[in-house]
Image (cartoon, rainbow, N blue to C red):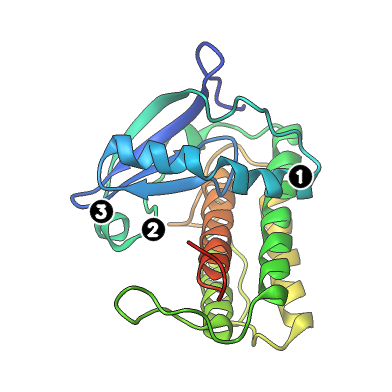
Amino acid sequence: MTTRPRGGSTPIYLELGQKRVFACSFDWPGWGRSGRTEELAIEALASYAPRYAVVAEQAGIRWPATVADAFDVVERLPGNMTTDFGAPGQVPEADSQRLAAAETKRLTALVEASWAVFDQVVAKSPAQLRKGPRGGGRDRDKMVAHVLAAEAAYARKVGVRHPEPDITDADAIAALRADLLGALRAPSDGTPPEAKGWPVRYAARRVAWHVLDHAWEMQDRSPGRTA
């Protein structure tokens, strides 16, 4: 079932690392941001609400105008090295709940929308992106390759095995995404579909987060845009 907020607030969880905290929405896969403290992570999450609204619109799902006005921290999880490295890496307890058919349809629509937004950003981005403050950061094609490699790895967490597709192989990319969506759409009682894998809710959230994190990075590092 969908995690229910108290008093109309949006349910989130916090993943607490030593150097970084992630604030992630339960019900909007991909809407998750980090900061040095709980307060800064939640502020960052709220600030990205307008950018995530584009994903909801792409999915045809109503984005409440007040979704970022108040948050209900439903779980706090200890982070790990992945957290401090810069990615959410812990599975909240709520992800072990059974998935209703309507929620499965909603989650997969948002994952598909995240891919669509990413593809649109890639199509509009230059090959060379503005470097970070220390001169680092991948250019467009290397970032796309990184995202596809991660998706092939994430897919194995739900029992889908594909080789990492080349960024120019549209058929291989489509096949990986189709099979990954098929695994996310399968009926789930909340247990991971693969031994040592991920629950479907978490898999959807992690896939969408990684795609959107790099889509937004690509936008911010495109020449002419102020990050």
Residue 186 appears in view: no
Depth check: 179 or 174 in front? 174
Percent coordinates x, y for residue 206 in the rendering: 51, 54
Kindly report the distance in space between the C-alpha atoms of the residues bearing marks 3 and 2: 10 Å
- Residue placed at 60% from the left, 32% from the top? 98
Q: Is mark 3 in CB contact (under 8 Å) with mark 1?
A: no
Q: Is mark 3 in CB contact (under 8 Å) with mark 2?
A: no
Q: Which residue is mark 1?
A: 57
Identify residue type, mark 2. Answer: Ala
Q: Mark on residue 87?
A: 2
Q: Point out the residue furthest to the left here.
A: 18
Identify residue type, mark 1. Answer: Glu
Percent coordinates x, y for residue 163 in the rendering: 60, 82
Q: Is residue 178 left or right of residue 86?
A: right
Where disc 1 sits, the SS reads helix
Q: Is residue 193 left or right of residue 182?
A: left
- Residue placed at 52% from the left, 45% from the top? 48
Q: Which residue is mark 3?
A: 80
Identify residue type, mark 3. Answer: Asn
- Which circle, 2 or 1, is nearer the viewer? 1
Label 2 crowd bin: few (<14), some (14–19), many (20+), radius 10 Å: many
Depth check: 36 or 126 in front? 126
- Which circle, 3 or 2, is nearer the viewer? 2
Which is nearer the N-term, disc 2 or disc 1? Answer: 1
